[in-house]
Image: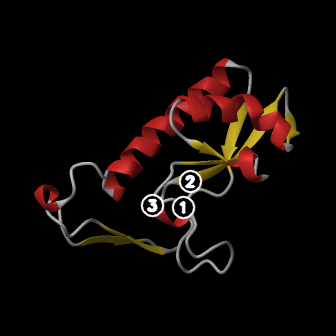
């Protein structure tokens, strides 16, 4: 699939550009961004299931960050759809510390992700892309 797919509703306008490089032209050892995004979604579903099976509840914090947002780093993996911040709860209590997220962070790293607890952002879960975590 090539080009740009766009959609809009009354609240916002979003676009998603796909790769313009034919699959056969991409280096064999480098996963395309779109492929990483699909992998990230599967990994995220595993993290959510892990959290649930261990008595935690999650809600989304910052997931996709549109380029029009005026906060965060311009190179953030949230802008590439490769990062999510989760709000963590147990027994109805909001758990905010990095230490609270550690069991999930260790699991996330075990399935190939980068956990923000290693750089003082405990609720951040991402998939490395071009050296960014």
Q: x%, y% of residue 74? A: 58, 76
Q: Residues within 10 Å of mark 2 (few under 14, many from 20)?
A: many
Task: Identify the mark nearer the N-term, 3 or 2.
Answer: 2
Q: In the depicted view, which residue is nearer to us: 20 or 62?
A: 20
What is the CA distance from the residue labelled 2 to the residue labelled 1? Answer: 5 Å
Q: In the depicted view, which residue is nearer to us: 131 or 23?
A: 131
Q: What colour scheme has been applied to the protein in the rendered image?
A: secondary structure
Q: x%, y% of residue 104? A: 68, 32
Task: Identify the mark nearer the N-term, 2 or 1.
Answer: 1
For discs 3 and 2, the disc positioned in front in the rendered view: 3
Q: In the depicted view, which residue is nearer to us: 11 or 70?
A: 70
- Quadrant position of the N terminus in the picture: bottom left
Q: Residues within 10 Å of mark 3 (few under 14, many from 20)?
A: few
Q: Which residue is mark 2?
A: 83
* x 21%, y 50%: residue: 28
Q: Secondary structure at mark 2?
A: strand
| Above-or-below relation of 25 to 118 | below
| Above-or-below relation of 40 to 68 | above
Q: Is residue 6 left or right of residue 50?
A: left
For discs 3 and 1, the disc positioned in front in the rendered view: 3
What is the CA distance from the residue labelled 3 to the residue labelled 2? Answer: 14 Å
Task: Please say if the residues under marks 2 and 1 sit with CB atoms less than 8 Å apart.
Answer: yes
* x 67%, y 72%: residue: 72
| Above-or-below relation of 98 to 71 | above
Q: x%, y% of residue 22? A: 14, 62
Q: Which residue is mark 1?
A: 77
Q: Secondary structure at mark 3?
A: loop
> Residue 130 has which mark?
3
Q: Is residue 100 left or right of residue 46?
A: right
Q: Residues within 10 Å of mark 1 (few under 14, many from 20)?
A: many
């Amino acid at each position: 699939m090539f080009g740009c797919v766009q959609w809009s509703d009354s609240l916002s306008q979003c676009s998603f550009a796909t790769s313009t490089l034919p699959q056969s032209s991409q280096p064999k050892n480098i996963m395309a961004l779109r492929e990483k995004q699909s992998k990230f979604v599967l990994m995220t579903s595993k993290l959510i299931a892990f959290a649930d099976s261990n008595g935690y509840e999650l809600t989304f914090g910052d997931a996709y960050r549109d380029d029009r947002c005026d906060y965060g780093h311009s190179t953030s993996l949230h802008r590439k759809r490769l990062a999510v911040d989760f709000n963590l709860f147990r027994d109805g209590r909001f758990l905010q510390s990095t230490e609270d997220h550690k069991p999930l962070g260790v699991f996330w790293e075990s399935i190939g992700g980068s956990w923000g607890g290693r750089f003082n952002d405990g609720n951040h879960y991402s998939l490395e892309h071009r050296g960014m975590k």
